[in-house]
Amino acid sequence: MLISLQLATNQICNTTLDPWSRAKALVAEFTIEEKIKNTQDNSPGVPRIGLPPYEWWNEALHGVAWSPGISFGAAGQQFNYATSFPQPITMGAAWDMPLIRAVAETISTEARAFSNAGRGGLNFWTPNINPFRDPRWGRGQEVPSEDPYFISQYVNQLIPGLQGGLQADPYFKLVATCKHYAGYDIEDWGGNKRYGYDAVISPQDLRDYYLPPFQACARDANAQSFMCSYNAVNGVPTCADPWLLEDLLRDHWNWTGSDQWVTSDCDALKNVYSAHHFRNMSAPAAAAASLNAGTDLDCGSFWPENLGAAYNGSLFNETTLDVSLTRRYASLVRLGYFDPSEKQPYRQLGWADVATADAQTLARKAAIEGLVLLKNNDALPLSKPGGAIKTVAVIGPMAAASRQMQGNYYGNPPVLVSPAAAFQKAGYTVLTIPGVGVSSGTLAGVAAALAAAQKADAVVFVGGIDNGLESEEHDRTAIEWPAAQVTLIEQLATLTAEAGKEKPFVVVQMGTVVDASAVRDSTGVDALLWAGYPGQDGGTAIVDVLLGKTAPAGRLPFTQYPAGYVDEVPMTDMALRPSRGQNDTGKGNPGRTYKCAVISPDSELLSQFTTSALLAQSSTAASYKDLLPFASVPVTVSNTGNVTSDFVVMAFLKGEYGPKPYPLKSLAAFTRLHDIPAGTSVNATLEIQMGSVARSDEQGNLVLWPGQYSLVLDIDSKDSWNFTIAGDAAVLDVLPPRRTI
């Protein structure tokens, strides 16, 4: 920012002071009217003292994205594109935390370059870290997993990658925002809209499932910003909940930096009044309630429109408003916003640092690592050009997908390579026919698709679901593969089966959760590859795997539910544990669980522990008891195939300990091993932390329970390590009691 002569005389520009003192000096110059005007995301600044406007709302979920604060250049101009990585759900399928760190660092470099050119701000409202609890959720593509432990590991890499480290040194690269805090995973289902939905969640499920990613964001990864969500939790809108924002976030998780602040989701503060009708408050009272609860910024205009009346009615103290403003401007100080650019390495980033060759390679690598092979009856890899396969029919509603591969929250990418285009680039003759739409029931194009398949040496169907079926504000009511697509797949399977192995038939599944059993179990479908939303170079990644240029090693980060699951449990049942006959369906909640991978331990380990001995480490080993080391698990992975491949190793804990009903299993550790040559073995170590072994009691306290445990290294539990924990139950962490408001 160019500092005006007026502003230069304010202590905000005194680089010898700490950020809070500098920001406090700036806010002290505001009148009460100017303070209130600058409580919105599109802050007008204070022209009287030379403070320019500032847009706090910028997006970068999987690359710099269209948003109020981001301005892309026109075609042919600088800053007309930015690298578009796969959606988080596809990157989650890679199970590769160093990859997440590298992607985050690249995104933040490009975001800083946009900001330096006056085309973006420094505060980014990413990541989305609500667990993918229900397969119908429209925003499941935005998150990396359904598992809270996995997401916690994800944010521990993503946040420092985005912000330039755990601490400012001396500046942060940008500010990341962990959203949506908390219990948010319904858009519009069964008449329940996100704006006024009250998520009824037990303390046990809060602590076990909904809160861990946010704890990691605040306590461990040092995210500089949080976003409170549209919904209420147990009767209190999150943006007006002092228990969530003060007792838990700031006090219990020690999120007390003078430059850390909370924004609302957009119009969430208005919804406290208009959708939740919270305590039947007036608009000014609702505005004051959110401010007093600990929210610092309104994404919207509700505060500027109502805080004046609230102030005149003595519904909040001006000091409270000063604290909120000072936090945000202290954040800008940490970002170097008010400091000379020549002393800041991040301010030197420019157009040459956007969409570099390394960034493009990384985007393709992220897409490849996230591909999951669900079936292969010796059909893959397909032959190379010049072999038996020379003509490929690429059929389906996403055969020529471009924007569809990006999912939502996207920007302008430098390239968009569809599966059909990637086959052409690889030297094949390509026949491209959609055949059917993503969700349309018409079969008018089926005949043309079958004719193309008849002429081809191999058939690749690319379909599934896209943003037309799952998106923000749009949940699904069904999770089966769209019927018209299944009809075409079945007819293609029949046609190719008649040709035997001479005409392989491969299906590529896009989007998130669908019941793929009919496709997977079809004898005429030779291979099934899940791709999710693979980003700008998704077509290249898919074709590279189909041609055998690289081996697919991703694992699904979500459960593949059967289609009938949606008839058993409503989305509004927030419980994770089974509960028969207790919801609107009359069938009860069958439980929400996850599936994962296979590996075996290579040695016997310890067989008994005591809680007292385990916790004796707490004074020196870690700042928090849940982060204490529990065990190091050595494993050996052997590549029995004939190609070099990665492999994802996962460990789960199971057992009947703690309160009933017991979870089937819980993810405890994972790692991705890279480039294991065919016919060789590699060793790895899985580090298990105490928090992964513990379970919550009914009050939401995290407890290490005595009992019989099993560490299983396979979804089918083909191998396990059984051990006992003796002694008394030991509390690792106490969930603060809810205050009455």
Image: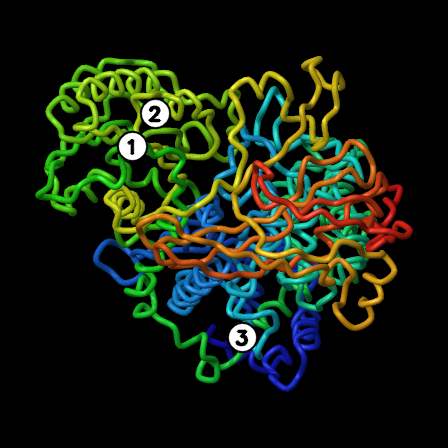
Q: Is residue 186 above or below residue 13?
A: above
Q: Does residue 299 appear left or right of residue 735 in this picture? A: left
How far across and how far down the image is residue 514, in percent?
46, 27
**Label 3, label 1: how far apart the Cα atoms are:** 44 Å
Q: Is residue 696 above or below residue 377?
A: below
The answer to whether the residues at label 2 and label 1 have Cβ atoms under 8 Å apart is yes
How far across and how far down the image is residue 511, in percent?
41, 34
Outermost residue to the front = 604
Q: Amino acid at mark 2?
A: Val
Q: Label for residue 438?
A: 2
Question: In terms of secondary structure, where does tag 1 sit?
Answer: loop
Q: Is residue 269 above or below residue 250?
A: above
Labels 3 and 2: the sequence-earlier one: 3
In the picture of the structure, the residue carrying the numbered disc 3 is 336
Labels 3 and 1: the sequence-earlier one: 3
Which mark's residue is nearer the viewer, 3 or 2? 2
Question: In terms of secondary structure, where does tag 2 sit?
Answer: loop
The answer to whether the residues at label 3 and label 2 have Cβ atoms under 8 Å apart is no
Outermost residue to the left = 386
Labels 2 and 1: the sequence-earlier one: 1
Residue drawn at (25%, 33%), measured in percent from left and top?
399
Residue drawn at (74%, 65%), measured in percent from left and top?
256
